[in-house]
Amino acid sequence: MEDGATIYYNREVPMVWIGGVMKSGISLTQAMLQAHTGLQCVEEYYVIPGLLSMYRKQHRSEIETERVLKAGITDAVLQESMAAYVLSLFTNQWRPNKQLCVTSPFALRFMDIIKTILPNSKFILILRDGRSTCHAAISQNFNMPGQTNFFSPRFDYKTYPGCIKSWNEATNVTHALCKKMGPDSCLPVKYENLVDDSRKEMERVKEFLGISLNSLEWNDDHKEIHRKTSNKVLNKLIDVDHSMDKHIQNMTRIAPMLLELGYDLNEWHVKH
């Protein structure tokens, strides 16, 4: 702290985690939350997911679990240590009058572990039509280095069918975890709804988090966010690369999560 005061945090501190598949509108959600709430959002893409991934692998291995226990390290000790480490990553950026919000797309694959080590965590899972997500990623030559530990097989951002399959796998995992965590701990938010009716979606987020909104009026920054998103991103997809069209008829097989999430398999590029 600048004034020299010492601030202590513990495992009971409330935290908000925002995540989902990359290019799904996570940054837009973060910007809206910071503009209208008392949340302070920080980004962390690699360290926490890597830590949680190693913990899960160790936990699933009887041999590794036995070795750790023989060393006198119980699960309670591990969880306490992990919580302290995660919190230590943000203390220099954390303002005491703000609730911490962590933007970490990969971390939501480990919601169950996070909830165990930081029990007052809440999760916002951003969902977007996988075809739009993949079109955005491929058309922008998007690449996410360092993801090997979090996706097996590696997430494909190069080809439409490969990307859609990767999106389906990742979304299936996080959506199932979100339902398992329950409505008090995890809120699914559709990117399309966030853009089409931001006010309504922000009200849902407000109720979920139990926080107040600074204002529901569109300030200049918020209008600019909405304008850029609506005009530059959504309208661009009307002129979608038609190399996706030949895969449309296979979407039920390639990406069943599209139907589960209620997306129209025929009119996605016009609407989104």
Image (tube, rainbow, N blue to C red):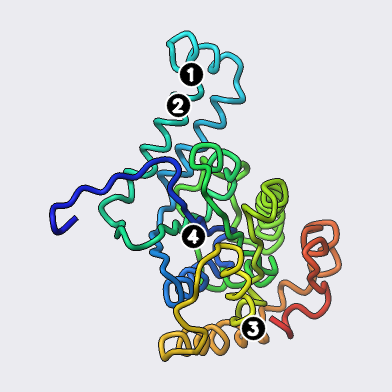
Q: Position of residue 212 (x, y in %)?
A: 50, 72
Mark 4 and mark 2 lie on one chain; the one further toward the N terminus is 2
For residue 49, side relative to residue 239 (left or right) = left
Per the image, the residue denoted by label 4 is 143
Q: Position of residue 194 (x, y in %)?
A: 61, 77
Placement of 201 over or under 3, stated as above or below: below
Per the image, the residue denoted by label 2 is 78
Circle 4 Cα neighbour tier, 10 Å, few/some/many (<14 / 14–19 / ≥20): some
Distance, label 1 to label 3, CA atoms, is 47 Å
Mark whose residue sits in front, 1 or 4 = 1
Q: Position of residue 266 (x, y in %)?
A: 83, 77
Per the image, the residue denoted by label 1 is 74
Distance, label 4 to label 2, CA atoms, is 33 Å
Instruction: Name the residue: 54% across, 25% down.
Output: 58
Circles 1 and 3: CB atoms closer than 8 Å = no
Label 4: state its secondary structure. Answer: loop
- Quarter the C terminus occupies: bottom right
Mark 1 and mark 4 lie on one chain; the one further toward the N terminus is 1
Instruction: Name the residue: 52% across, 84% down.
Output: 216
Mark 4 and mark 3 lie on one chain; the one further toward the N terminus is 4
Circles 1 and 2: CB atoms closer than 8 Å = yes
Mark 2 and mark 3 lie on one chain; the one further toward the N terminus is 2
Label 2: state its secondary structure. Answer: helix
* Residue closest to the eye, 260 or 205: 205
Instruction: Name the residue: 50% across, 47% down.
Output: 147
Distance, label 1 to label 2, CA atoms, is 6 Å
Q: Position of residue 245 (x, y in %)?
A: 77, 74
- Kind of residue sitting beneath label 4: Asn
